[in-house]
Image: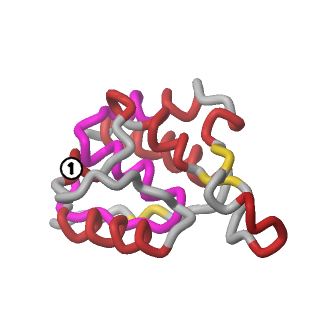
């Protein structure tokens, strides 16, 4: 039987999914043939694809202060009300992934541009990540 978890985004659901992964991976010993996710759910799946245990994934969210993942978007700030965003979530990648790696190099993506959930190019990188797992 092939298994494929699909992880959605949306605030508290991401932390809940980390707990579910802890049970599935560590306690039930499930393995997965494919993973897919959207938005914040891809963080959990990326950690899983890096070989983290379910407990490590869940502990990342338990020990992370919510403001630790928000970065000021200095590039967009001069645009004021026309800015795409005032903040990014780039710091979540740096604080959630092992060794603080927020680039795609651990996923086999050739360039070292930081992944950003707030940009169109980052969304295509996440799609590439999902295809390679």
User: Left or right: where does residue 123 sit relative to residue 108?
Assistant: right
Element class at badge 1: loop
Other residues around mark 1 within 10 Å, as few (<14) / some (14–19) / many (≥20): few
Q: Which image quarter holds the N terminus?
A: bottom left
Magenta segment, which residues? 31-58
Residue under the image location 53 percent in, 57 percent down: 40
Q: Is residue 62 above or below residue 115?
A: above
Residue under the image location 43 percent in, 71 percent down: 123
Q: Which image quarter holds the C terminus?
A: bottom left
Residue under the image location 42 percent in, 66 percent down: 122
Q: Nearer the viewer, residue 16 or 107?
A: 107
Task: Check if residue 33 falls in the magenta segment.
Answer: yes
Identify residue for label 1.
31
Q: x and y percent of residue 38 in the render?
A: 48, 68
Residue under the image location 45 percent in, 37 percent down: 94
Q: Is residue 78 above or below residue 81?
A: above
Q: x and y percent of residue 50 in the render?
A: 25, 42
Q: x and y percent of residue 6 in the render?
A: 40, 66
Q: How many marks?
A: 1
Q: Nearer the viewer, residue 75 or 131?
A: 75
Task: Check if residue 114 falls in the magenta segment.
Answer: no
């Amino acid at each position: 039987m092939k298994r494929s978890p699909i992880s959605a985004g949306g605030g508290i659901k991401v932390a809940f999914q980390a707990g579910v992964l802890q049970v599935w991976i560590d306690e039930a010993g499930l393995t997965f043939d494919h993973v897919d996710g959207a938005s914040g759910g891809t963080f959990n799946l990326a950690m899983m694809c890096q070989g983290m245990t379910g407990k490590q994934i869940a502990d990342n969210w338990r020990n992370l202060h919510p403001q630790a993942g928000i970065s000021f978007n200095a590039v967009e700030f001069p645009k004021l009300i026309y800015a795409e965003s005032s903040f990014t979530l780039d710091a979540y990648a740096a604080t959630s992934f092992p060794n603080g790696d927020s680039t795609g190099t651990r996923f086999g993506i050739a360039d070292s541009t930081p992944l950003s959930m707030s940009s169109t190019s980052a969304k295509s990188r996440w799609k590439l990540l999902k295809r390679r797992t």
